Image (spheres, rainbow, N blue to C red):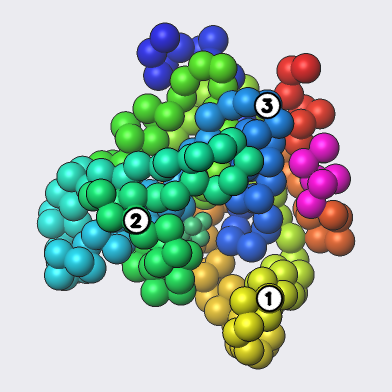
């Protein structure tokens, strides 16, 4: 089976950060027994590696080389837990989720040669029995031929409230209006960039998860797939 084999089903889930797509995509992959591509983690990993190597973020060639050379491994002990992420052999699972890694990812993701360098690495995740691909441009650029496409959204207020709850659970006190501002700024940056801007594929099913429990969103997505 090659990456181009149309017999390997692909479900793409795109949407803004905080829409719940990571949680939903992982749950759907577990339910189906399919592989899972967390493309945001790849961008975060390259952002970190570029920082380690002291690469100037305006040096597109060096960033592209870094994207090509960075080895990212997802190691899962069991299918239901989130995998550990190793970047060039170092476990960065916790570091990867920080705002610093997110900001670095967002910056390098706007560089065309970085996106090009990550294209084949992402396509290589397409393997039997199937793939759930989570990101911003999965249905538009990386797997435009995917049989199943979902664009998952939620209002900015709901996404800020979810993020606030997550951070409070970790004992971090942050103001919700600050989070809302950050989310709006990140949305604008991801939607307005010249290359692979965040937008739904023309053939994607739009799903607004505002006010819908995550289990129900998972059910709705699973119902689109072959039994
Ligand atoms: O989904 P995330 O928060 O882990 O993504 C981190 C950053 O990477 C985000 O600012 C947008 C970028 N990204 C992207 O440009 N394309 C993707 N397919 C996934 C993430």
**Between disc 3 and disc 2, whose residue precedes?**
3
* Front position in the image: 69 or 108: 69
Which residue occupies 39% across, 35% down?
A: 122
* Front position in the image: 126 or 192: 126
Name the residue tied to disc 1: 169
**Between disc 1 and disc 2, whose residue precedes?**
2
Give the x, y percent position of residue 42.
38, 49
What distance separates the C-alpha of mark 1 from that of mark 3?
A: 30 Å
Magenta-colored segment: predominant secondary structure = helix
What distance separates the C-alpha of mark 1 from that of mark 2?
A: 23 Å
Name the residue tied to disc 2: 91
- Is 142 on the left or on the right of 156, as rendered? left
Which residue occupies 56% across, 22% down?
A: 130
Give the x, y percent position of residue 13.
61, 41
**Between disc 1 and disc 3, whose residue precedes?**
3
* Front position in the image: 171 or 129: 171
Q: Are marks 1 and 2 in contact (CB under 8 Å)?
A: no
Name the residue tied to disc 3: 32
Q: Are marks 1 and 3 in contact (CB under 8 Å)?
A: no
Residue 113 visible from this viewpoint: no
In the displayed structure, would residue 208 be above or below residue 58?
above
Query: Which label number is shown at residue 113?
Result: none
Q: Are marks 3 and 2 in contact (CB under 8 Å)?
A: no
In the displayed structure, would residue 218 be above or below residue 18?
above
| Image: magenta residue range | 214-219
Q: Residues within 10 Å of mark 3 (few under 14, many from 20)?
A: some
């Amino acid at each position: 089976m090659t990456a181009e084999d149309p017999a390997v089903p692909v479900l793409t889930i795109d949407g803004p950060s905080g829409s719940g797509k990571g949680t939903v995509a992982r749950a759907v992959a577990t339910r189906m027994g399919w592989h899972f591509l967390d493309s945001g983690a790849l961008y975060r990993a390259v952002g970190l590696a570029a920082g380690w190597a002291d690469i100037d973020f305006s040096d597109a060639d060096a960033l592209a080389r870094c994207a090509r050379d960075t080895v990212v491994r997802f190691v899962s002990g069991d299918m239901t837990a989130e995998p550990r992420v190793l970047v060039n052999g170092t476990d960065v699972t916790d570091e990867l989720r920080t705002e610093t890694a997110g900001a670095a990812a967002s910056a390098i993701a706007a560089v065309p040669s970085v996106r090009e360098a990550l294209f084949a690495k992402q396509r290589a995740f397409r393997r039997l029995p199937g793939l759930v691909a989570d990101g911003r441009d999965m249905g538009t650029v990386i797997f435009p031929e995917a049989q199943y496409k979902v664009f998952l959204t939620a209002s900015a207020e709901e996404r800020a409230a979810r993020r606030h709850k997550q951070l409070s659970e970790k004992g971090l006190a942050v103001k919700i209006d600050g989070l809302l501002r950050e989310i709006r700024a990140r949305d604008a940056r991801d939607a307005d960039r010249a290359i692979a801007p965040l937008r739904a594929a023309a053939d994607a099913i739009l799903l607004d998860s505002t006010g819908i429990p995550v289990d129900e969103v998972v059910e709705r997505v699973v119902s689109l797939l072959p039994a």
